[in-house]
Image (cartoon, helix red, strand yellow):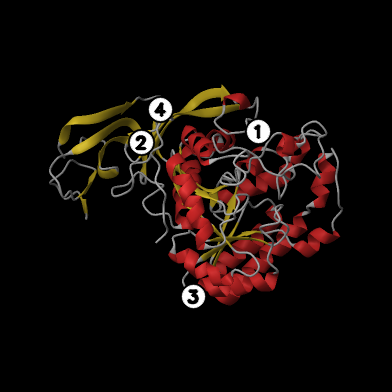
Amino acid sequence: MIVEDAGSTAAGAAVLDQTSGQGFDLVIRAKKAMLPDGVSSAEIGVKDGRIVEIAADSTLSGAVAEDANVIEVDETQILLPGLVDTHVHVNDPGRSEWEGFDSATRAAAAGGVTTIIDMPLNSLPPTVNVESLDIKREVAGPKAFVDVGFWGGAIPGNTADLGPLHDAGVYGFKCFLEDSGVEEFPPLEPAEMQADMAELAKFDGLLIVHAEDHEVMASAPSGSGPKFSDFLATRPREAENVAIQRVIDAARATGARAHILHLSSSDALPSIAAAKAEGVKITVETCPHYLVFSAEEIPDGATTHKCCPPIREESNREALWQGLIDGTIDCIVSDHSPSTAELKLLDSGDFGAAWGGISSLQLGLSLVWTEAAKRGIDLAEVVRWMSSAPAEVARVENKGAIAVGFDADFAVFAPEEEWTVVATELHHRNQITAYDTRTVRGAVKSTILRGTPVSFDEPQGKLLRAR
């Protein structure tokens, strides 16, 4: 039970009724803490990995255990809620040379991310039935340095598996409307997508969609070579626009919840806004690479910057920022999609043949804050887009906010500290990234998972199940 202060506790405090009188096992004292109502000084009491009391601009009323840990956050830093990244390709098992749960979750922790949700494809087997989910969990459990949840997959012929996967605790189901890049995860036809949405509507499930239309893609130029402009032409905005309208129409027809992954085309924003206003259950994400880069600045042959859908023009980037500001876009997630250096074809620079994906799991907060600050956007908005908003979209419980009853997940962030990305110093298994040598603003100094500082030596993450 959460008890709001009625005069019996310190002013500004919220308290979780404790069943034991042993007191807090962790106390955090921060000159600046990002609470749901704004930034203030705060003392935060933690017990058994949960936040049990918050005293804003005051001191805790509860007892502190004799052996309690006390963490002081100085005035140059701010205590943030741990970030929630709902779009991470870990690729383990099966393609763990691309990434693995040990390296991915270390990278997440280093970037202030305390919860990830793993995508169902690029691992072998893909997570398209309960048996494959069990395999994924068995592999992830001993390696997780942060908390990990899982998406299921929706592919042709597995509609009967969606309900059992939902009951087993996946957060929703991913599908493609265009080739996924791996043969074991084929795309759905639009009619199949709508049929799956109708099935998901029976239990309020969520379909998350890679929205590029196959028919539009088939009529676009093929191949590309080293010129980024040629690659961009192979994946036109119209492919996204048409596919997103298909998702909206199917969500309207079925009443199901749907989520657009990695929005790249700003042309789709008016349709999305109109659908939301109508009451269609649609949410949308975008990613750091679409907010940081523009097509005009990508050198020919720079396949580190290849992703699908692609990075588009500067005017498109600015329209995506506006979509975040006005609420049409709900959240920002990484779409961390790593591979080996060999698959990126760095020598030939062939955009058409190189693997599409950008590694950024460790870097997202600093990247987005750097760009947001240039545009006069407050850090609180950035943190909301990257913590509470993705948690709300995926319905990840007790994550994404510094609030009583929530898990004691925190990132200590120095917002004014500038530093330069060095790819070889990142925790990603393959230390190549489009952001190598880029100077960014804001550094994660430490990360706390359920009340325990992440050590990077001892995995302490838990596997999460949707309810």
Q: Amino acid at mark 3?
A: Lys
Q: Is residue 165 above or below residue 182?
A: below
Left/right placement of residue 365 relative to residue 353 reads left
Q: Earlier in the sequence, mark 4 or mark 1?
A: 4
Give the camera-side residue of 370 and 165: 165
Q: Earlier in the sequence, mark 3 or mark 2?
A: 2
Question: Could you say whether the residue bearing mark 1 is in a helix, strand or loop?
Answer: loop
Specify the quadrant of the image occupied by residue 179: bottom right
Q: Is residue 338 above or below residue 203?
A: above
Real-space Cα distance between discs 2 and 4?
A: 9 Å
Q: Which residue is disc 1 drawn over?
A: 433
Type of amino acid at the residue the image marks with label 1: Thr
> How busy is the neighbourhood of tag 2: few (under 14 within 10 Å), some, or many (20 plus)?
many
Residue 202 is labelled as 3
Q: What residue type is disc 4 on?
A: Gln
Kindly identify the residue that appears in the image at 60 percent across and 67 percent down: 275
- As measured in the structure, the alpha-carbon distance from the residue carrying label 2 to the one carrying label 1 is 31 Å
Residue that badge 2 annotates:
33
Cα separation, mark 3 vs mark 2, equals 41 Å
Q: Between marks 3 and 4, how big is the CA–CA gap?
A: 46 Å
Nearer the camera: disc 3 or disc 4: 3
The x and y percentages for residue 151 are 52, 56
Whole-number angstrom distance, CA of label 1 to CA of label 3 = 41 Å
Q: Nearer the viewer, mark 3 or mark 2?
A: 3
Residue at the spot 71% in from the left edge and 56% down from the top edge: 183
The CA span between labels 4 and 1 is: 27 Å
Give percent across and percent down for residue 10: 17, 40
